[in-house]
Image: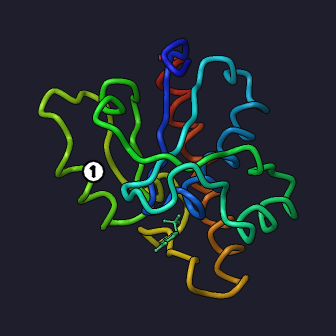
């Protein structure tokens, strides 16, 4: 149960089979290696219902595997209204998904809703959708996600340590 954690993070893209599972697996790994791992919960979801119940795209699984991340156990789900009660951070991969999340966001949501790359050391604001492209796209997603994961962990560590 995600509610047992002090801080919880939900990563969101369109299908929940490429970008957000990559963010989920990479950030989970970064969290597991940190001293505060037991305090941080991680999940991912899609704004669409296109791939509910599916495993991550095999190209995302393979690209992540080359860097030591295991995405194979993840399963796509759609964002639910309850997620706004459960999660402290809801982080979108791009502006389109952020707009969707903002549209559905209850007025009493008191977490942080924004773009994941706000925490990265890159100029790019959005994680580009690799679904219709070649393998370079999946590797680029990993570069962006690894950087943002480090930045997000630093932010949460500051928050927890007060
Ligand atoms: P994701 O990529 O949002 O990063 O999971 C996509 C996956 C599937 C589709 C689009 C984007 N699709 O149109 O099926």
x 53%, y 57%: residue: 120
Would you name the residue on which mark 1 appears? 101
Rate crowding at label 1 as few (under 14), some (14 to 19) or many (20 or more) other CA atoms within 10 Å: many
The quarter of the picture where the N terminus appears is: top right
| Residue 16 x/y as whole percent | 52, 56
Q: Secondary structure at mark 1?
A: helix
In the rendered view, would you say 74 is above or below 139?
A: above
Counting labels gives 1
Left or right, residue 136 beside residue 9:
right
Check the image and name the residue furthest to the left: 107
Front-most of residues 52 and 128: 52
| 76, 125: nearer the viewer | 76
Q: Residue at x 80, y 49 (%)?
A: 70
**48 relative to 129, above or below:** above
Q: At 54% across and 12% down in the image, what residue appears? A: 4
Q: Is residue 57 above or below residue 43?
A: below
Asked if disc 1 is less than 8 Å from ligand 1, the answer is no
Tell me residue 134's x, y (percent): 68, 87
Residue visible at 37% across and 55% down?
47
């Amino acid at each position: 149960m995600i509610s047992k954690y002090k801080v919880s993070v939900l990563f969101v893209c369109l299908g929940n089979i490429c970008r957000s599972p990559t963010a989920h697996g990479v950030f989970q790994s970064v969290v597991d290696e940190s001293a505060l791992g037991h305090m941080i919960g991680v999940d991912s979801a899609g704004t669409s219902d296109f791939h509910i119940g599916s495993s991550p795209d095999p190209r995302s699984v393979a690209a992540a595997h080359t860097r030591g991340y295991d995405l194979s156990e993840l399963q796509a789900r759609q964002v639910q209204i309850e997620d706004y009660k459960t999660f402290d951070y809801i982080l979108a991969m791009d502006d389109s998904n952020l707009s969707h999340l903002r549209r559905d966001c209850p007025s009493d949501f008191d977490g942080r809703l924004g773009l994941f790359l706000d925490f990265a050391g890159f100029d790019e604001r959005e994680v580009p959708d690799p679904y219709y492209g070649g393998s370079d796209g999946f590797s680029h997603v990993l570069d962006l996600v690894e950087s943002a994961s480090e930045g997000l962990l630093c932010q949460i560590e500051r928050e927890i340590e007060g």
